[in-house]
Image (cartoon, rainbow, N blue to C red):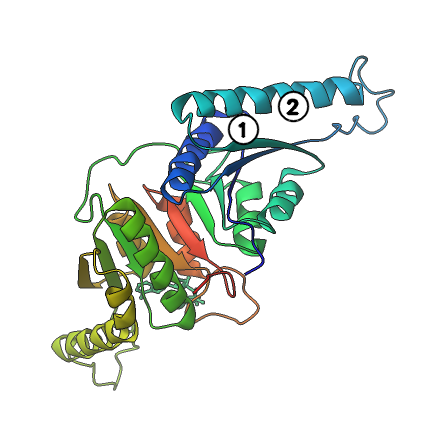
Amino acid sequence: MTHRPAVVVGVDGSEQAFTAAAWALDTAARHHMPLDVVHSWSIPLPPVGLGPAPVGLSDDRIRDAAQAVLDDVVSRLQATAPDVTINGSLYPGTPAAALLEAAEKATLVVVGSSGLDRMTEFILGSVTQQIVTHSPCPVAVVPAGEATEPGLETGRVVVGIDGSELSVDATRLAFEEASMRHAGLTLLHVWNAPEYDTAGIVMPDTLMLEEAHTDELRAMAETVAGLGEKYPDVQVEQRLRQGRPAKVLADASRGAALVVVGSRGHGGFKSMLLGSTSRSLLHHAQCPVLVVRPGTADS
Ligand SMILES: Nc1ncnc2c1ncn2[C@@H]1O[C@H](COP(=O)(O)OP(=O)(O)OP(=O)(O)O)[C@@H](O)[C@H]1O
Ligand SMILES: [Mg+2]
């Protein structure tokens, strides 16, 4: 791979971004990698037709203010982890462009689910959306708060598998993360009975469907059995649940160490950059979510 082994995190001065940076620092330390903290600055556009830009907004002053924000984050982080190499990088331009450029050389890019400009608790920030759909390496999205109440997968790494190629890539990363975090790993497959217009159609038996999905999960687990041998320290559970995949995955995120998914799965239109399961999970997850995009997971 051409990526430099570093974890990159984007900060904007918000507490939510600092939470993401602290999570990125912990992850970098576990991977024995440096952390690159990225902050971008740009000149605000003056309101059109309202005369000259406000006095005092020179390039230098804006850049200096941005540098101060970055220095503050780096020194707060460094105080908690003196042994980790932490670099601060200031980029001119938009945050998304800065992060995508930094991600070119990274192993993982980390962002908060929303930042300074957030509108509500659950809406994904626009920068985060751009990173998740365009990053050249896997992306971790860190939510603002703690889980409301711990769930069944507390402390574990959970990977959503639907049998797609990307969910196999996701499983590979999930094994690695579980091993690094000394956490158990749950292979979670969610199934749902198809909705039929019942007129004149014989509904498939639920038990039969459940059995079919149990076989499917077993087959998926066999596909990644080699990973179990590579990571013998990781305790693995296979879980089959019925319901809406995004809802079940969000529920599994309560108290989990990490949920790992592919950016795409089996369904959808080829041109879509993010499937509906991943998108909905990113809005509702209560723990960090690692999204694996095509061609970004190392073997
Ligand atoms: N039934 C499922 N059980 C567990 N995990 C799933 C399931 N469906 C999807 N996932 C996870 O979510 C990832 C993205 O799949 P998603 O369903 O969002 O995309 P898609 O199938 O391409 O599009 P869509 O389902 O919206 O048509 C998958 O790689 C997998 O990790
Ligand atoms: Mg799908």
Could you say which disc has been placed on residue 150 in the image? none
List the residue tagged with mark 2: 66
Q: What residue type is labelled 2?
A: Ala
x 44%, y 44%: residue:
141
For residue 22, side relative to residue 243 (left or right): right
Determine whether, in the image, residue 226 is placed left or right of residue 118.
left
Number of dots carrying numbers: 2
Q: Is residue 66 visible?
A: yes
Looking at the picture, how far across and down is residue 138, in whole percent?
48, 54
* Element under disc 1: loop
Quadrant where the N terminus sits is bottom right
Q: Which-is-in-front pick, marks 2 and 1?
A: 2
Q: In the rendering, at what x and y percent does residue 124 appear?
A: 48, 42
Front position in the image: 74 or 277: 74
- Pointer 2 or 1: first along the chain: 2
Is the shortest distance between ligand 1 and the CB of mark 2 under 8 Å? no
Looking at the image, is 228 positioned above or below residue 109?
below
**Mark 2 neighbour class, 10 Å CA radius: few under 14, some 14 to 19, many 20 or more:** many
**Is residue 112 positioned above or below 295 on the image?**
above
Q: Looking at the rendering, which quadrant does residue 265 occupy?
A: bottom left
Query: Judging from the image, what secondary structure is the residue with disc 2 in?
Result: helix
At a point 38% along the width and 48% down the height, the residue shown is: 289
Q: Name the residue under label 1.
A: 116
Cα separation, mark 2 vs mark 1, equals 14 Å
Q: Quadrant of the C terminus?
A: bottom left
User: Could one spot residue 118 in this view of the protein?
Assistant: no
285 left or right of 58 in image: left
View quadrant of ligand 1: bottom left
The three-letter amino acid code for the residue at tag 1 is: Leu
Q: Does the residue labelled 1 lie within 8 Å of ligand 1?
A: no
